[in-house]
Image (tube, rainbow, N blue to C red):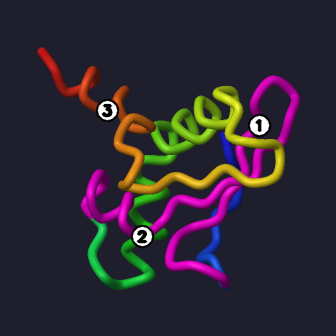
Amino acid sequence: MSDTAVLSKIVEGVEFTVLDRLVTVRAVILRDALESFFGADASPQSWLRAYREHRQVIDKAAADRYRSGAGPTLTILTARRPQDFAHLAARREP
């Protein structure tokens, strides 16, 4: 789980880190994913709030993306890759 999350100074989104198998993964979840999957709106504070409310799910997506070979430098989560959030659908099904 990540312990800090901050608004990105480079892109519209939230930067965070997650520990995955003793590796610290740097990640960013973009505004589009926060709005599409986690109920955020256009305000940057809502992006942070959405990240904090859904941190476990988002951290899992970042760790999964990292393990899939996304690269060691930075993992980026975006709504343009809905497969990164496929585990959300499984949680919603009865």
Q: Position of residue 24 (x, y in %)?
A: 83, 42
Q: Type of residue at label 1? A: Leu
- Judging from the image, what secondary structure is the residue with disc 2 in? helix
- Residue at coordinates 48% horizontally, 56% vertically from top-left? 52
**Residues in magenta?**
10-39
* Extreme-right residue of the structure: 22
Q: Disc 1 and disc 3: Cα gap in Å?
A: 20 Å
Q: Residue at x 86, y 34 (%)?
A: 23
Residue 14 lies in the magenta-colored region: yes
**Disc 3 marks which amino acid?**
Leu
Q: Which residue is mark 3?
A: 88
Relative to 28, does residue 43 appear above or below in the rendering? below
Query: Real-space Cα distance between discs 2 and 1?
Result: 22 Å
Q: Residue at x 71, y 43 (%)?
A: 18
What kind of residue is marked 2?
A: Arg
Q: Looking at the image, which residue is at 64% across and 27% down?
A: 68
Question: How many other residues sit within 10 Å of disc 3, few (<14), some (14-19) or many (≥20)?
Answer: some
Q: Would you call the spot at circle 2 few (<14 residues within 10 Å), some (14-19), or many (20 or more)? A: many
Determine which of the numbered discs, if any, sits on residue 28 in the image.
none
Tag 1, which secondary structure? Answer: strand
Whether 44 is among the magenta residues is no
Q: Nearer the viewer, residue 21 or 11?
A: 11
Whether pointer 1 and pointer 3 mark residues with C-beta atoms closer than 8 Å, the reply is no
Looking at marks 2 and 1 on the same chain, the residue that comes earlier in the sequence is marked by 1
Is 93 left, or right, of 90 in this rendering? left
Q: Are marks 2 and 3 in contact (CB under 8 Å)?
A: no
**Of the residues under marks 2 and 3, which one precedes in the sequence?**
2
The residue indicated by pointer 2 is 31
Q: Which residue is mark 1?
A: 19
Determine whether 67 is above or below 7 in the image: above
Residue 38 lies in quadrant = bottom left
